[in-house]
Image: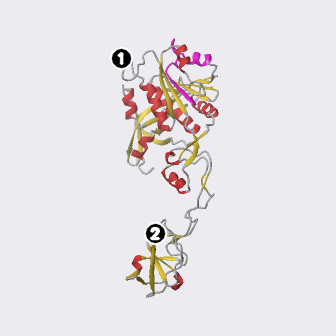
Amino acid sequence: MEKMISYARAKELIDREIPHLGSETIEVTRGHNRVLAQDTPAYVSLPSAKISFRDGYALLSKDSAPGKRFKLSHPVFAGHPRAEPIPQGEAVWIATGAVIPDGADAVIDEEKVKKLGDEIELLEKVDPGLNIREDTEEFKKDEVLLSKGALIGSREISLLIAGGYFEIEVVRKPILWVIAVGDELRHPGTVTRPGQIYPSAGWLIASMSEELGCALARVILVEDDPEALIEALPSPAEADIVITVGGTGFGRKDIIVDTLNALKANIIFQGVKTRPSHSLIFSRKDNQLIFSLPGRISATEIGFNIFIRSAIFKMMAKPDDTVIVQARAKTDLEARKDLRLILRGKLELKDNELWAEPLRMKSWHREMVEADGYIILEENRKPSKIGDRVQFMIHRNRVPFFFPKS
């Protein structure tokens, strides 16, 4: 076990331990924001035959000329191909998406003909292939539509359905348990006594994990008792990720390390040189990752977003969508040797430049709601003066406010 390690080392160790998740089969219509676990060759060709690109009249182009008349035959509609070919000198009205009948090689627009009873008169010559989509123009049967690892959105779902898919194989969602530790915790909806609180930090972690795509299995409250915690922790077969909240410090009732040792979990590291969330503990038991966050919600939120968020993305084979920008400091900012400082902050767009200032509210919960993200002051840097550039990690839901087209 490594103790009180650097931010970079912590990220390196977490990345090294990420297990490979298996796959699951889901309906393609439920595939939004999932990752393909295998290539997807088309089951059908599209189009599967020559079809009309628009409503018009199908005819043989070599017989066309301005003033040339064609006798009209029975119309052709999408989904109802004509069995017999069009006789020479005849044309048929054809709907968009309908199969081009034999004996025709072009479709002239309705506005480019005169309708004369059961005949049409052309206003211009027609080129072969006009308004026709060739068979397999989009893709051929067995052509790979999307490759393994593709992130699925609405357009990808449309493509897969067009290729004949009803079900797809995707990376399964990691199953997550959250365990909030503390004698003072009470379930939402129950009555509290002075000093007792509701587990807002535990449910914050549960909600953020679900937002990222985890399958939330349980949120459990446990007293500051090692035996109760051991009893509450799921087996590796029950959960891919366990996040405990509380009990990571160095007080008499900070029970996480003793509990992990009793479970024979492999504690990878204890403590990171960041403020807040310096008491983060990272462990592994078989293929199960265990992240132990401090219980103070100000540190809980930052620890999750700085360390666990990227691990969940990697586990699900998704691209990390973290957005970090350069902003100018609106106030002087401290620096600490060998310590990375993370401050909740507000952004302001002024004269086409982003300006950042830290939030220092007495209410941690309100501060979280008000913040646009985090000012990140790397270790071993000089203190920042007003106007100096600093890193700012923008909360994903705040990005459109500052980058409307991103």
Of residues 188 and 296, the one drawn nearer to the viewer in this rendering: 188
The residue that appears at 52% across and 18% down in the rendered structure is: 249
Quarter of the image holding residue 263? top right
The residue that appears at 42% across and 23% down in the rendered structure is: 199
Above or below 35: residue 233: above
> Which is more foreground, mark 1 or mark 2?
2
Q: Give residue 360's position: percent from left, percent from top.
A: 38, 29
Q: Give residue 227's position: percent from left, percent from top.
A: 55, 13
Q: According to the image, label 2 marks what residue?
A: 77
Of residues 237 and 309, the one drawn nearer to the viewer in this rendering: 237
Amino acid type at circle 1 is Thr
Instruction: Answer whether residue 76 is visible to the viewer in this image.
Output: yes
Q: Position of 159 compared to 350: left or right?
A: right
Q: Residues in magenta?
A: 239-262
The residue that appears at 58% across and 65% down in the rendered structure is: 136
**In what quadrant of the picture does the N terminus appear?**
top right
Element at label 1? loop
Q: Position of 89 compared to 188: left or right?
A: right
Looking at this rendering, what residue extends furthest in the front direction? 83
Element at label 2? loop
Q: Tell whether label 2 touches label 1 (CB within 8 Å).
A: no
Amino acid type at circle 2 is Phe
Q: Give residue 254's position: percent from left, percent from top.
A: 52, 16
The residue that appears at 55% across and 64% down in the rendered structure is: 47
On residue 192, the disc is 1
